[in-house]
């Protein structure tokens, strides 16, 4: 066999290999992404990709009343707009009504009640509903103060082609004796 025939054979062979790699490598990369959660959440807890995923950690002195820790009731709302939530919060019986965890207004897409015990870590996951732009969390502390017991968290926007829509979120909250804190804030203070 002459060198030109061998060279042509090698070119054809290399071209086939490179075309195969061009197809297989991206397919492998895309499929491998599905096996890994891009989160700090443990693998054995509820988790919904592009959903709203909670990690709630209750302090050992959670919801103190007369020096004794108690369970804490929380309600998480998926909202298209936070105005109705904030207005209800300002009413005299607003906190009690919000802790019922119902769809009190058309801007509420979904409501979920959660209960955290002192010293407990819980993980909850919920599908993100269409049109939700914020998640509002209210905690039923005995010594309720709005600034410490309510968090309104905007959902990050995902850009798909030329459209923008709110995406899912991983929300990690530390529930201390009297307030809701971001877990990252607690870690930076030297907490768990």
Image (cartoon, rainbow, N blue to C red):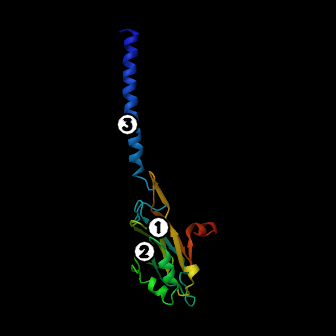
- In this view, the residue farthest toward the top is 2
- 82 to the left or right of 106: right
Q: Is residue 177 visible?
A: no
Q: With respect to residue 164, does 81 lie above or below?
A: below
Residue on which the image places disc 1: 133
- Could you tell me how far apart the alpha carbons at marks 2 and 3 are, in whole angstroms? 45 Å
- In this view, the residue farthest toward the right is 189
Given contact means CB atoms under 8 Å apart, are the residues at marks 1 and 3 in contact?
Answer: no
Locate residue 163, reporting x and y percent: 44, 55
Q: Which of marks 2 and 3 is nearer the N terminus?
A: 3
The residue under the point 37% across, 12% down is: 5
Locate residue 185, reporting x and y percent: 60, 68
Callout 2 secondary element: loop
Circle 1 packing at 10 Å, graded few (<14), some (14-19), many (20+), is many
- In this view, the residue farthest toward the front is 162
Residue on which the image places disc 3: 23
- Could you tell me how far apart the alpha carbons at marks 2 and 1 are, in whole angstroms? 10 Å
Q: With respect to residue 188, does 35 lie above or below?
A: above
Circle 3 packing at 10 Å, graded few (<14), some (14-19), many (20+), is few
Residue 107 tag number: 2
The residue under the point 51% across, 90% down is: 92
């Amino acid at each position: 066999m002459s060198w030109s025939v061998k060279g042509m054979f090698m070119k054809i062979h290399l071209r086939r290999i490179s075309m195969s790699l061009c197809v297989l490598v991206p397919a492998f990369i895309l499929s491998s992404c599905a096996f890994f959660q891009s989160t700090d959440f443990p693998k054995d807890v509820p988790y919904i990709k592009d959903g709203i995923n909670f990690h709630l950690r209750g302090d050992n002195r959670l919801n103190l009343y007369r020096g004794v820790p108690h369970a804490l009731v929380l309600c998480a709302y998926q909202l298209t707009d936070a105005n109705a939530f904030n207005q209800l919060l300002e009413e005299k019986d607003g906190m009690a009504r919000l802790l019922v965890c119902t769809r009190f207004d058309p801007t509420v897409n979904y409501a979920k009640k959660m209960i955290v015990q002192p010293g407990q870590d819980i993980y909850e996951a919920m599908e993100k509903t269409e049109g939700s732009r914020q998640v509002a969390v209210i905690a039923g502390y005995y010594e309720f103060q709005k600034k410490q017991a309510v968090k309104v968290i905007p959902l990050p926007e995902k850009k798909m082609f030329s459209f923008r829509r709110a995406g899912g979120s991983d929300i990690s909250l530390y529930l201390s004796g009297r307030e809701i804190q971001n877990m990252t804030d607690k870690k930076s203070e030297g907490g768990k």
